[in-house]
Image (spheres, rainbow, N blue to C red):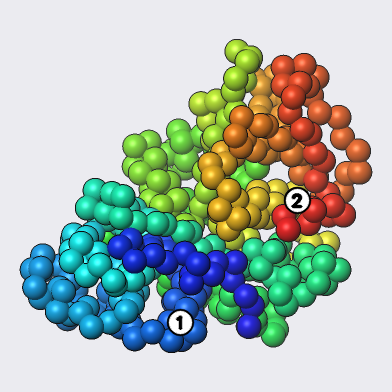
Amino acid sequence: MIKRIYDLHKLVKKGKVLIIYGPRRAGKTTLLDDFLKKDGGRHKLVSGDDIKVREILSSQEIREICEYAGGYEIFAVDEAQQIENIGLALKILVDNLNDLIVVVTGSSSFEIVQKTGEPLTGRKRTLILYPFSQKELLSLWNVSELKEKLEEFLIFGSYPEVVMAKTKKEKIEILEELANSYLLKDILSFEKIKSSKILIDLLRLLAFQIGSLVSLNELSGNLKIDVKTVGRYLDLLEKNFVIKKVGGFSRNLRSEISSKCKYYFVDNGIRNAVIAQYQNLKLRNDIGGLWENFFVVEKMKKAAFDRIMPVNFYFWRTYGGKEIDLIEEMSGKVSAYEIKWGVSKHKFPKDWKENYKNAKNFLISKDNYLKFLL
């Protein structure tokens, strides 16, 4: 059993809804089940996939909804994004059953936020559950062992089922199932997109551009769809926890690029599954991109799991080609990270050092990376 970073016993509160969202198969249901088993209180767990549950909770009937959850100490809804008017239903519960603890999970931040936003203003707390972080994996392996398994994480990622799989063949089979059956499920369902081909083609293009600036016009030309549609698809992919968008950092120089973005995959294994590439690192020519994707997303996980808010992530680049891979801004303090797989020394650009004198600058290598993630 790998201990998750969140202790729901410390996060739930009567009169408020705890919302847990994140990628499909990242462990939300397991986390919820474990909490309910250990709590010991009388609880009711329902699923948004159940037609009867959807009918009752979307009815907006106060008496019916309260009777459905009444008599329990904890009321939990899994896959809540499937339920129309779920925000109003949850508001009814916390407003009328003051001693009830309410927990819901969802795999689409767009659907959950949209459906719970206004009704639950001041009545909710939200968490994002990503695939395992390096800090969580410390409950299974020590620092030395994590370093030994780095190649596995770069190739196969850290989805719970993948981490626990014993063989390379098992890991690949799980990733293929995730990529083909679960990755785009919510987008295809809620957005009424008839075919996943364009979305998969878009992800493949992004997979080959990790660490590079992404041009929507270029993507539009390659996919033969208009730029607005490309932008909408990218937004949907991010809101469904497939990719993460990082914008340009700009404060002082006219030459700083701030209008373009980079995109990273929430999990390295999914990135490799999209392009069906599982070779060992010594046989690959994309190790730099894999390494950058891994470190950037692990920093995002750490910020979310440590409940450090707000943290903003950027890249820095000038029109002259000078660049820094990752900029982290927190409470006005700036840290710059240059992420290099096989480099032991690095000089940060003169323009950066002169204009951001108070920034802390770090070179991230396979020798020191855990220092910044644990």
Closer to the chain start, of discs 2 and 1, is 1
Q: Is residue 290 above or below residue 152?
A: above
Nearest the eye: 72 or 244: 72
Image vertical order of residue 161 relative to residue 313, above or below: below
Residue type for callout 1: Asp
Residue that badge 2 annotates: 372
Q: Is residue 206 left or right of residue 369?
A: left
Instruction: Give the image location of residue 83, x and y in percent.
Output: 23, 67
Query: Horizontally, is 126 left or right of 340 in the view?
Result: left
Q: Which residue is mark 1?
A: 39
Q: Which residue lies at the image location 74% right of the left edge and 39% below the top edge?
A: 337
Number of marks: 2
Few, some or many residues within 10 Å of mark 1 (<14, 14–19, 20+)? few
The location of residue 193, given as percent across then percent down, is 29, 58
Task: Compare residues 327 and 330 and report the one nearer the observer.
Answer: 330
Name the side, left or right, on which 208 lies relative to 219. right
Q: Residue 64, position in %: x, y? A: 10, 75
Q: Residue furthest front?
A: 99
Residue reaching furthest top? 254
In the orientation shown, which residue stands out farthest toward the right?
344
Answer left or right for 368 relative to 182.
right
Residue 190 location, x and y as percent?
Answer: 27, 60
- Amino acid type at circle 2 is Phe
Which SS class for mark 2? helix
Residue drawn at x 62%, y 75% as measured from the top left: 3
Q: Is residue 4 visible?
A: yes
Q: Nearer the viewer, mark 2 or mark 1?
A: 1
Q: Which residue is located at x 40 percent, y 46 percent?
A: 235
Q: Alpha-carbon distance for marks 2 and 1?
A: 33 Å
